[in-house]
C-alpha cells in the first residue's frame, strides 16, 4: 500500500506552519549533507524564513558560499 498524495497548500495556523517549516528545513539540510557525502559534490543551501531569518548549509565549510550576480 502506497502513501496518499498530500495536497500542498499554505498552512493557516501560524504555530503549525512554524513547526512544519522547522521539520522540513532540517530534513532538507540532511538531504543536502547526504548528497554531498554520497556523490562527493559541494552543496550550498540557503533558506530564508518568512520572518527573513537566514539558515545556511555548505558542504565545503562555513562562509565558503559564493554569491554571483548576473
Image (cartoon, rainbow, N blue to C red):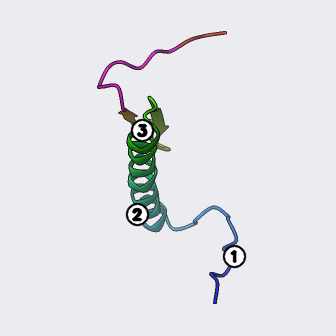
Does the magenta run of residues contain 38? no
Q: Is 70 situated above or below 48?
A: above
In percent of width and height, residue 8 lies at 67, 65
Q: Secondary structure at mark 3?
A: helix
**1 or 21, which lies in front?**
1
Q: Quadrant of the N terminus?
A: bottom right
Residues at circles 2 and 3 in contact by the CB criterion of under 8 Å:
no
What residue would you read off at disc 2? 19
Residue at image coords 58%, 65%:
11
**Marks 1, 3: nearer the viewer:** 3
Give the mark, 2 or 3, whose residue is nearer the N terminus: 2
What residue would you read off at disc 1? 5
**33 or 25, which lies in front?**
33
**15 or 40, which lies in front?**
40
Q: CA gap, disc 2 to disc 1? A: 21 Å
Extreme-front residue of the structure? 39
Mark 1 closeness class: few <14, some 14–19, many ≥20 residues within 10 Å: few
Q: Is 67 situated above or below 20?
A: above
Does the magenta run of residues contain 61? yes
Which residues make up the magenta segment? 59-67
Mark 3 closeness class: few <14, some 14–19, many ≥20 residues within 10 Å: some
Give the mark, 1 or 3, whose residue is nearer the N terminus: 1
What residue would you read off at disc 3? 36
Extreme-left residue of the structure? 62
Residue at image coords 46%, 15%:
66
Amino acid at each position: 500500500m502506497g502513501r496518499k498524495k498530500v495536497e500542498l497548500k499554505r498552512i493557516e495556523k501560524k504555530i503549525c506552519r512554524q513547526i512544519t517549516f522547522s521539520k522540513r528545513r532540517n530534513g532538507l539540510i540532511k538531504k543536502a549533507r547526504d548528497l554531498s557525502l554520497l556523490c562527493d559534490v559541494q552543496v550550498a543551501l540557503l533558506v530564508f524564513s518568512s520572518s527573513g531569518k537566514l539558515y545556511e548549509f555548505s558542504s565545503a565549510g562555513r562562509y565558503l558560499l559564493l554569491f554571483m550576480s548576473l
